[in-house]
Amino acid sequence: MRRRRLWWRLRWMWIMKSRMLEDRIGLGWRPALAAGILSNLDQIDIVEVIADDFFEASRSQRRALRTLANQTPVTLHGVSLGLASTVAVGPKRLACMARLCDEIAPTSWSEHLAFVRGGGFEIGHLAAPPRTTATLEGALTNLARATSTVGVAPQVENVASLIDPPGSDRDEATWVSEIIRGSDCDLLLDLHNLYANSLNFNFDPVDFIERLPAERIATIHLAGGKWIGAQGERRLLDDHLHDVPDPVYDLLTEVGARVAGSLTVILERDGEFPSIQILLQQLDRARLALARGRERLAVAHPQEVAA
Amino acid sequence: MSSSQFEAFLARIYVDDDARAAFLADPRTEATKAGLTEHEAESLTKIDRVGLDLFAQSLERKRRHRKQIRQGKGWRLWR
């Protein structure tokens, strides 16, 4: 009996190992990191490119992006569509995304569950919309339109917020899950956004992960931030200018322990860049954190892994 | 809920200093003037003021940063 159990355990570990090979750990493409990324592609499984930077790019810039996509898997990440809104997404922006996807043939594309403009005002950043039935329905309409125009459903990302979205009648885990379940879109789960919101608005991030449809989590973002505001009124700002904090790696382990499907993990860094070696070390740390979760998954849910 | 109006109202108080000051001085009156529903106006009286202030400051920093980028002095920050 004991030998049989051991045999099954080894078998599931072997299956897990083969599945782990499908997990990808990559880095956000930034011009300042270009040389470092290109000279270390053997250690970077995938590169995430900000799509909007190429909407109005010159022919040579787009050719450069195609060259990059020919060398390594590329995923496109949008920041300005404003899909989580009761206002219809702009057809011109969607057409730009569709054209870029056609040209680059990314492994996937993604956008945020945010609104970015309203009444003629450009917010200039990702704003968390009121979490209501109206924004849920607006988001589902926009996501269907985006899917139809681009030809592939986007992955959708939870956003960080400094302000508790006014007018909300449900919590974030409920609202995000409703959007995922009501659409064809998988989730890009940004763990630093989740971590920041959990500290800013006092909820348990692991409970949040538990409440998501695990089978729909496809991509993970890792990033860092800093505390802002006066003592007693501080909030964690997701600024992408700092190293990934330890609890975010712990959350990656938690996700790895719950999601049986392959995951793509992207480290985002927008400035105050450390050396590429430091960033590669952070990718290694992400690999380790994910592997820890995968080990837990293999032990706890071997059937799920086999399926 | 007139949600598109509500989003427009939020966008305005996030980026317009004068509109935000007027709103914080009298949330219900400003919300009503903007044509929001009673329910929306009520929700805005309970707005997270600390978060609103920090978010507005953060947006202002990003606007300054983008201005520098346009002048070729930095790299873009979006999220």
Image (cartoon, rainbow, N blue to C red):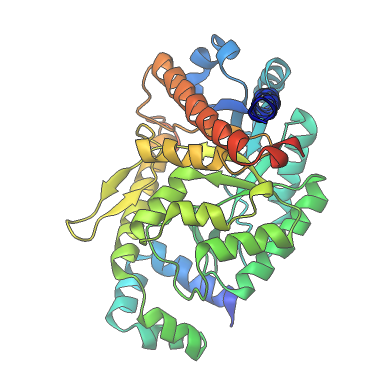
Kindly give the residue lying farthest to the left in the view shown: A231
Q: Nearer the viewer, residue A307 or A101?
A: A307
Please name the residue shown 39% across and 50% down the image. Answer: A196
| The image quarter in which residue A266 lies | top right
Q: Is residue A160 visible?
A: no
Judge by depth and name the residue closer to the eye, A12 or A210.
Answer: A12
> Left or right: where does residue A183 sit relative to residue A169?
right
Task: Write the residue at 73% across / 62% down.
Answer: A182
- Image position, residue A99 (x, y; %): 77, 38
Residue A31 seen in the current view: yes
Q: Residue furthest front?
A: A1
Among the 4 quarters of the image, the one containing residue A305: top right
- Compared to residue B18, the image places residue A219 above or below, namely above
Say above or below: B46 vs A303. Answer: below
Residue for point 38% across, 63% down:
A163
Q: Nearer the viewer, residue A2 or A234?
A: A2
Task: Name above or below for residue A253 compared with residue B26.
Answer: above
Q: Is residue A43 left or right of residue B43?
A: right
Q: Position of residue A83 (x, y in %)?
A: 64, 57
In percent of the image, x 63 and y 74: which residue is there? A134
